[in-house]
Image (tube, coloured by chain):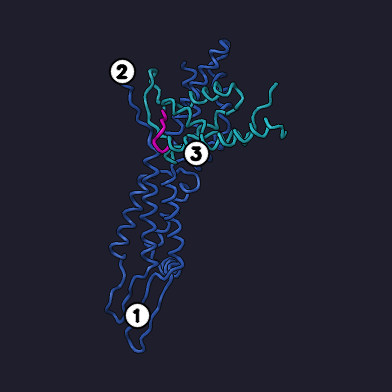
Chain colours: A blue, B cyan
Amino acid sequence: MCELDREIRRWRRQEMRRSSLSPRELDELEDHLRARVELELELDARLTPARAFAIARDGLGETSVLSREFARAGAVRWRRALGYGWALFALSFLLPALRFEFTHEPVQVLSLTGYEVFWAAVTEGGFRHALCNLAMLLTLPALWRGRVRGGRWLAGGIGLMGLYLLATGLSLPRGGGGFSASLQVGYLVWAASFVCAAVGLWLRAREWVPTTAERPEA
Amino acid sequence: MKKPVYKELVAASSRPMVLSILAGGESYGYEILKQVKVLSGGELEWSDGMLYPVLHRLERDGLIAGRWELTDEGRRRKYYRLTARGKRQLARDRVSWRAVHGALEMSWGGGHV
């Protein structure tokens, strides 16, 4: 059955590359394919294992269709959390994020939306803000195809960043110097979006680990 | 040669069919497919790829639960069993399908067709 094992390894590699099937889903399909191959070989002893495997694989249909169906039917908690993260992220750009109050006469109040803060960060060298947003962009492939490189690291990084942002409010000028700044709801929503996305990536990573199976009790 | 059952009817009956099979005990994908074929006398044409999304949907809805086990050949296999919620759903499905079946039988038997 070396030939069959080789075919299955090749199939798994291919599917890992081109579909969004998780290792667990592939395990289940592999078991199905092996059972089907056994049946095909029983029905026609002249078949080679490779040919029997091809028949079994064709019987399963297009795995791209299957992976879409799985995505629709399967456990989608991680995708939902990541989706909420992105929804919050987008919303934060529209909400007021920072409020400056100039205490010199005449007193002036300036409120900036998330987008305005981001734009100011890009144009005026506040790269830390911009980098945070860039990290969020790295999670997009996961939302799109269910696959992302270094998902655990990204989840850890974004999660810590979100918590840090929530806890410290970055390095905002606070009081003194003639004006004070305060964080608005947009900033909190922005920081929370990172935590939400991190939770989504973490849940996804948990589902993405290979299965652990137990031997049945005798 | 008999015509296969309509796809829509196959899809609609997939839940009660899987739940009924699992009511008889734990089973896995390929075995369930074989049982569908036997139970329907080959009239219900379930493609291999059709079953797994159904199983995953039922699992997501809490009607069945899956667990992984190593087979004698050292393969990982996912076994599914009916949950309490699945049993209740199966009872409801049974009532609904019997009602549909009964009404059709009556109408055909009564010479309406």
Q: What is the secondary structure assignment of the residue under circle 2?
A: loop
- The disc label shown at residue A70, or none: 3
Q: Viewed as shown, does residue A109 lie left or right of A146?
A: left
Of mark 3 and mark 2, the one earlier in the sequence is 3
Which residue has dot 2 on it?
A218
Label 3 and label 1 in one chain: yes
Of mark 3 and mark 1, the one earlier in the sequence is 3
Q: Is residue A191 magenta?
A: no
- The disc label shown at residue B29, or none: none
Which residue has dot 1 on it?
A101
Kind of residue at badge 3 = Phe
Residue located 43% across and 56% down the image: A134
Chain label for disc 3: A
Q: Viewed as shown, does residue A17 lie left or right of A103?
A: right
Which of the pair B60/A82 is nearer the observer?
B60
Chain label for disc 2: A
Label 3 and label 2 in one chain: yes
Kind of residue at badge 1 = Glu
Q: Viewed as shown, does residue B52 lie left or right of A204?
A: right
Q: Position of residue A166 (x, y in %)?
A: 31, 62
Q: What stretch of residues is rendered in magenta?
A: B78-86
In the rendered view of the protein, which quadrant contains the C terminus of chain B?
top right
Mark 2 residue crowding within 10 angstroms, few (<14) / some (14–19) / many (20+):
few
Give the number of the mark in front: 2 or 1.
2
Kindly indicate whether the residue at mark 1 contacts the one at mark 2 (C-beta within 8 angstroms). no
Chain label for disc 1: A
* Placement of A117 over or under A163, stated as above or below: below
Q: Position of residue A173 (x, y in %)?
A: 30, 73
